[in-house]
Amino acid sequence: MSKKIYLPFLTILFFSCSDYLPYSSARQTKSITDIPLKQSSENVDCFLNNQTPHKPFYKINIVEVTGTANASYDELIISLKNKAKQEGLDAVMILDKQQEIAYENLNQKIYLEDTTTAKYYRQLATAYQKLSAVGIKYAANINYLDTIVKTAAIELVCNNHKINGTIQFDFYGNPIAIDDNQLEKFYRDSIEPFDIARHNNSAVKDWQYKMNPLLTDEVDGFKKGAEGYETIIVKADEAVANKFYYKISDPVSNKVKKYTLVIERDAAKKITKKTLLQKSNIIWIEEIHYDKNIATGSKRYRVNNNKEEIIFTTINQFYSVNDLPKPLE
């Protein structure tokens, strides 16, 4: 009976404490050159014995794979190339192959009757191999920077007063400079929480994410703030796609306000419209504008007496190859 009572409780407790994962800069930051990657259908080239590519390239990061102690060198290289391709790399420069030993504590896995007064601790030693390489991206294959927003010119309307400014982003959509304090606060409080495209990649700093176990590239929910002191908690609807439930704590009154965000997408699954509701009341509508599948800007507004009242508008500018450092040759 005790197992039926306590085991489910322990399972729920463990799940509630560990299901959210913190934002990790490792998803974005590269160890050598911080250049964004995009997967290619081409095979990954492999360079050995200090060979280098014969065309301009960038060193991006260190790629590592492991294999069993008896894995062949060919098997390790194939595994390494597959991992590099998944990351969006074009080539690898092999560094070295190492023999390693992993130790696993067996004390809690094997029960032995203690017939002595001494305590014995047992470990399992497992030999394995590790192969390392420098990940390479060819300069000619970086042809997608014009889809990445570099700056957004924003005009915010506040109490019939217009505030104009610019938000600068890094290659991964993280704001690195906002030239007005009021705009920065508005961005953190009113734009970033509803940036579903970035949250679905669990890629927003200072947020925590719960991944969907069936759709590993999407989140079940996300939140901001320490455990028990969350300022915003968001949960995706389990039955209806593109619907998210928000709980936002008011920092002054400590009251929690509840909202629903509904997303609309086009045939290419790009977000074209966001609608924020409180119960059945529409708080605001945001439209995202595209030109040849590239988001050129947005407009958020509320409707008052059948008239649009603009909250803000944005116009985007994009990165280009001119923003990259000179490649190696």
Image: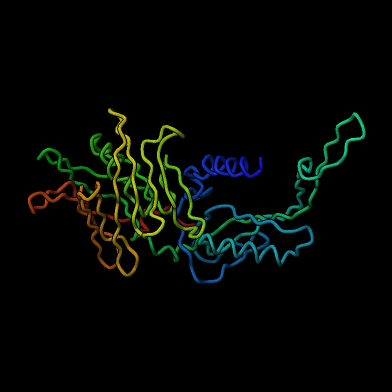
Q: Quadrant of residue 95?
A: bottom right
Instruction: Measuring from the top left, give residue 281's x and y in whole percent.
Output: 20, 49
Location of residue 237 (image quadrant): bottom left
Residue at 83 percent of width and 37 percent of height: 121
In-front residue for pair 121/160? 121
Report x, y in % for residue 233: 38, 42
Furthest residue toward front: 1
Please give left or right for residue 136 compared with residue 324 in the image: right
Tell me the residue at 53%/64% (across/down): 90
Looking at the rendered structure, the number of numbered marks drawn on it comes to 0
Q: Is residue 213 above or below residue 311?
A: below
x, y percent for residue 31: 53, 48
Image location (x, y in percent) of residue 293: 30, 66
Q: Is residue 40 above or below residue 219?
A: below
With respect to residue 225, does 52 lie above or below?
below
**Nearest the camera: 31 or 324?**
31
Looking at the image, the residue that sits furthest to the bottom is 42
Relative to 294, is 204 on the left or the right? right
| Colour pattern of the rendering | rainbow
Q: Would residue 235 appear left or right of 105 to someone viewing this image? A: left
Quadrant containing the N terminus in the rendered view: top right
Which is nearer the eye, 80 or 305? 305
